[in-house]
Image (cartoon, rainbow, N blue to C red):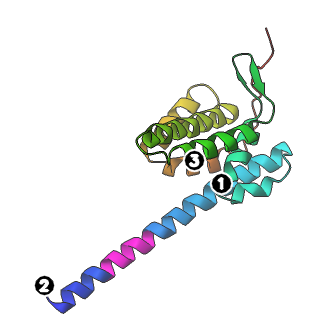
């Protein structure tokens, strides 16, 4: 390989890397803006936390609204979602068992996205959006969140039977 070819390859790799960074920033802005808009429309305090990467999980949980799991109703799901993600991340650092906790974290995040889509879209759309978001490694999730940011919140039925 000549020096010119090596320089050309390096330049191509640099341009590709720059395009990936720009694309990641675009997805980050779309997701954050969508989440921020939803939080503002719902009157959730500290909606600006949607712009902070880890704190986004708190805002995401609060935007989802109350969640009922069995007999337990999470009135502040943002704290539970943030705690679950952070706790699973810490547990994922354990040798040998770490991948199981990483997978659990992924399942929690996918579940949160599904709940978000189910609160702001109707019929089969939540499942479709979730499948497409997962299949695109999260890239479409940002676009979907941005698309539904002005939809009305559909409150879940969490009444105790």
Q: Is residue 145 left or right of residue 44?
A: left
Q: Secondary structure at mark 1?
A: loop
**Residue sticking out furthest to the top:** 161
Dots 3 and 1: beta carbons under 8 Å?
no
How crowded pointer 1 is (Cα within 10 Å; few <14, some 14-19, many 20+) is rated as few
Magenta segment: 11-19
Which residue shows up at 54% across the image and 40% down it?
Answer: 105
Q: Where is residue 110? Give x, y as percent.
A: 55, 37
Where residue 95 sits, quadrant-wise, is top left
For discs 2 and 1, the disc positioned in front in the rendered view: 1
Q: Which residue is mark 2?
A: 1
Q: Is residue 67 left or right of residue 112?
A: right
Question: What's the magenta bit mostly, secondary-structure-wise?
Answer: helix
**Residue sticking out furthest to the front:** 95
* The C terminus sits in image quarter: top right
Which residue shows up at 64% across the image and 29% down it?
Answer: 122
Q: Which residue is mark 3?
A: 90
First in residue order: circle 2 vs circle 1: 2
Nearer to us in this view, 64 or 132: 64
**Marking on residue 114:** none
Q: Where is residue 64? Give x, y as percent.
A: 72, 36
């Amino acid at each position: 390989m000549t020096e010119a070819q090596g320089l050309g390859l390096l330049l191509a790799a640099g341009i590709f890397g720059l395009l990936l960074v720009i694309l990641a920033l675009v997805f980050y802005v779309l997701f954050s803006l969508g989440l921020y808009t939803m939080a503002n429309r719902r009157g959730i305090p500290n909606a600006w936390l949607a712009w902070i990467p880890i704190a986004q999980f708190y805002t995401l949980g609060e935007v989802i609204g109350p969640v009922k799991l069995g007999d337990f109703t999470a009135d502040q799901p943002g704290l539970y979602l943030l705690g679950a993600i952070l706790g699973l991340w810490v547990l994922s650092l354990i040798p040998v068992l770490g991948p199981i906790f990483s997978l659990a974290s992924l399942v929690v995040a996918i579940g949160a996205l599904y709940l978000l889509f189910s609160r702001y879209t109707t019929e089969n759309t939540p499942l479709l959006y979730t499948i497409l978001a997962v299949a695109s490694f999260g890239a479409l999730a940002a676009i979907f969140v941005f698309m539904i940011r002005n939809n009305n919140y559909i409150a879940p039925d969490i009444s105790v039977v």
